[in-house]
Amino acid sequence: MKIENCPAYELVKEEEIEDIHARGYLLRHKKSGARVLLMENDDENKVFNIAFRTPPANSTGVAHILEHSVLEGSREFPLKDPFVELVKGSLNTFLNAMTYPDRTMYPVASCNDADFKNLMHVYLDAVFYPNIYERKEIFLQEGWNYQLESEDAPLCYNGVVYNEMKGAFSSADEVLEREIFNSLFPDTPYGVESGGDPSCIPDLTYEEFLDFHRKYYHPANSYIYLYGNMDMEAYLAWMDEKYLNAFEKITVESEIPLQKPFEAPKELRIPYPVLEDETEEYCSDCRKRKSYITQGKALWLHRDPVPAAVYRFKYKNRRSYGKVFAREMMEQYEKQIGRWRVREIIPVPLHRSKRRERGYNQAEILAEEIGALTGIPVRKDVLFRIRKTVP
């Protein structure tokens, strides 16, 4: 690559990186202020990532909700869920989005040139021109909303991120880890929960949600990353013409402050809910109802990257995850399954409306994969969901 062929960018640093057999370039887009890191080598697995520094001011989970929401359609891709379409039709080798305590990232990868450019196009359009300004229902769906299951049912909260974080906050280990982390850095963004505290998520307003995007999702606050064997000059020119040139450089206040040293040791006592008897198999809700469940087993702890993988498997058409999950289950519990003398595997059914909406039942996929590995028959004709329940 020759920087003189990229007049829209200025070279900040150039370095040979022997460990990965790559030539590295750190550039800055002159008009928008975007920082671009290039790793040029012979790897056919091309990688693109755009990341924004997104320090949260509270535990409403706005960064996490926004990460979900921008992938729900954009200016040039006004589909309900382009992410699912990419999963179904793309040749990607990696496709995801992640929220960290101080940044949000959108990485993709592919070995196919046309597919790679399409993935870049969809992701850049999603982060800079999402449909969240025209469709408030995206915020309500991904963040939080009120749900009434029936006329006489109590009003409750619902939402993709709200439900995901309820699961994350149900683990005593995660509660301990989170409280230690937050308590060590109370005067910084690390003192709050970037993923969202279920007790705080409903405090987030639609206007605050949009303001967060306006403030932080600007090229001047971004780091763009390209890696692999590709025509770097062509991709840089395309990004400039298609997206970056439309923005003027601004100052985005997103720096992470240092935590001031504590003047004295601190002792914190923070309560969290546990079972009345830690040896009991059921939670308090399940103990209130008649149940035919005699035992349950968990494959992993509910911590990163497990929640995101389960979410993609359940809601984002990642049906191939079923094979991976089934193999892991067999590695850990094959002997236990043998001791149980299982005669049939019955997947938890979906309500017909949810089946139509998703197009599949992830429990059936998992049951069929386990059945194929064990030879145990799978029965999908003995249990039916007749009532549509809240997730």
Image: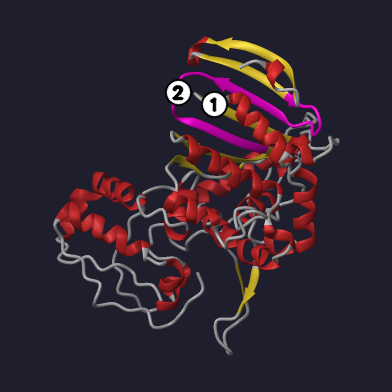
Residue under the image location 60 percent in, 82 percent down: 154
- As rendered, which of 329 and 106 lies closer to the eye? 106
Instruction: Report if residue 187 is visible in the image.
Output: no
Residue under the image location 43 percent in, 82 percent down: 387
Q: CA distance from mark 1 to mark 2?
A: 8 Å
Image disc number at residue 244: none
In what element is the residue under mark 2?
Answer: loop
Instruction: Report if residue 382 is visible in the image.
Output: yes
Residue situated furthest bottom in the rendering: 151
Residue marked by disc 2: 43
Question: Which comes sooner in the sequence, label 1 or label 2?
Answer: 2
Residue 180 in the image, given as x and y percentages of width and height: 63, 40
Seen in the image, is 106 located left or right of residue 26? left
Disc 1 vs disc 2: Cβ atoms closer than 8 Å?
yes
- As rendered, which of 355 and 263 lies closer to the eye? 355
Quadrant of image for the N terminus: top right
Residue under the image location 21 percent in, 52 percent down: 336
Q: Residues within 10 Å of mark 1 (few under 14, many from 20)?
A: many
Residue 361 in the image, given as x and y percentages of width and height: 36, 66
Q: Residues within 10 Å of mark 2 (few under 14, many from 20)?
A: some
Q: Examine the structure image and report whether residue 35 is included in the region drawn in magenta.
A: yes
Q: Examine the structure image and report whether residue 247 is included in the region drawn in magenta.
A: no
Q: Which picture quadrant has residue 288?
A: bottom left
Above or below 104: residue 43: above
Above or below 345: residue 252: above
Residue type at tag 1: Tyr
Which residues are the magenta region? 28-51
Above or below 342: residue 127: above
- As rendered, which of 37 and 53 lies closer to the eye? 37
In what element is the residue under mark 1?
Answer: strand
Residue type at tag 2: Asp
Residue marked by disc 1: 227
